[in-house]
Amino acid sequence: MFLENLSLENFKNYSSSSFSFSPKLNFIYGENGNGKTNILEAISMLCYTRSFLLNSDNDCVKYGNNNFNIKGEFTSGININSTLRYSYNKDTASKSLLYGNDKVTRLNEFIGSFPLIVLSPGDLKLSMGTPLDKRRNFDLLISQVSRLYFDDLKSYTKVIKQKNSLLKENLVNRKYSSKDLKNMLGLWNEELVSFGIKILLRRLDFIEEFRSYQAECFNRIAGSSYLPVINYESDINTDSDNLGIDALRRSYSELLESKMDTEIKRGISLAGPHRDNYIFLMEKNGDLFDMRTFASQGEHKTFVVSLKLAEFGFIKDNIANSNIGDPILLLDDIFSELDKGRIKKISSLITGFNQVFLTTTDKEYMDTLREDFDEISAYHITKELPSLVNQL
Ligand SMILES: Nc1ncnc2c1ncn2[C@@H]1O[C@H](COP(=O)(O)OP(=O)(O)OP(=O)(O)O)[C@@H](O)[C@H]1O
Ligand SMILES: [Mg+2]
């Protein structure tokens, strides 16, 4: 699957612009602040139904206007064309996403239909990031290949919200007796266990499956002296001898039970997959080193680049039996963060990918990319208008 045409209307700094893209490498260059990232952001809004930068729709409306429109025409390998239209109106605060002529109302049916991987300078800090950053990254990744996971996550989040609002309400006006409150919390906890265990098991399976994808990418970029490892950290006992569904249920129920008094005191849910963490480690000669304390800045970046590029193979293989087509990759200005040797390795790795979009302020990177890509479509983004510049 690739994005053939993109039109932007009153989106950020674009009044009305259209782009035709190559199915392989799209090299987008220009000075700071000219609108390179904005193009990638628009693509992410079509594929993810929200901005990869987590900007609000309001912030994306071009200053002085009331609404924006993004239109993307996609083609899949077997020549099926699909159009996505994302519109937002500031006055009515209404957003709509059309897939062909149909309004997308059920996110779970849509997510993963246009698989996308984004790597931006913000992501390069993922290994130093918060548990929330890491959960968000992998939740989006797993959701793109599993509707079931997306649904469970949504149900779980809803229960957490309801439980939290009960806990908060109790802090403000203690209208329930301790016994009633604990009974009600017990009911929410049962729901949490039921959805939470499914999420937990999927995440544990995921890190097992993902390991070889990341190892391969890391090896190709940085050699084999280290092996990247991701572990899952949870207050629920996930030791290998406790991995049966019944044992996990029991551990989780007991954990929730043991936390109940503290949760009541603090007015917030304290245990479960919404508090879990992914730990990034490096393995050398059988010893494991925690990235947070061990890695240099460059090693952090290499770890994350290998992780994000590994997402390509992971998604591709997981949707191989569908007619969706391979994911699109957006690389937002990451070359400036890496040394030449790594850039060369990344370039040779991504030639085997599907459609790639790459932004940079430095058009010299074209020379490196040309060694791996036969054909590159280049776009020069200036303050005035974007232009296609294929003969550089
Ligand atoms: N709602 C908006 N309306 C109009 N212009 C906007 C809006 N939001 C952001 N901009 C402008 O978009 C520009 C930033 O675009 P973008 O982030 O795509 O630049 P860039 O080319 O990626 O720059 P850099 O090389 O620094 O990353 C800024 O000049 C900013 O003022
Ligand atoms: Mg940018």
Image: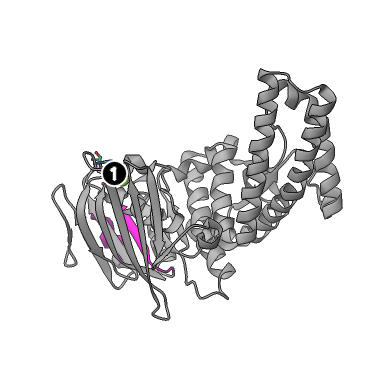
The residue most toward the bottom is 78
The residue under the point 26% across, 60% down is 7
Identify whether 62 is placed above or below 353. above
Which percent across, then down, holds residue 195? 72, 49
Q: Quadrant of the C terminus?
A: bottom left
Q: Quadrant of the N terminus?
A: bottom left
Identify whether 71 is placed above or below 50. below
Q: In this rendering, would 174 be left or right of 225?
A: right
Secondary element at image label 1: loop
Going by the numbered disc 1, the residue's amino acid type is: Val
Q: Quadrant of residue 291?
A: top right
The residue under the point 53% across, 38% down is 129
Identify whether 260 is placed above or below 192. above
Residue 338 visible? The answer is: no
Q: Which residues are magenta?
A: 353-369
The residue under the point 32% across, 42% down is 90
Q: Quadrant of residue 53?
A: top left
Cβ at disc 1 under 8 Å from ligand 1: yes
The residue under the point 20% across, 57% down is 17
* Front residue (pair 326, 365): 326
Pointer 1 residue: 61
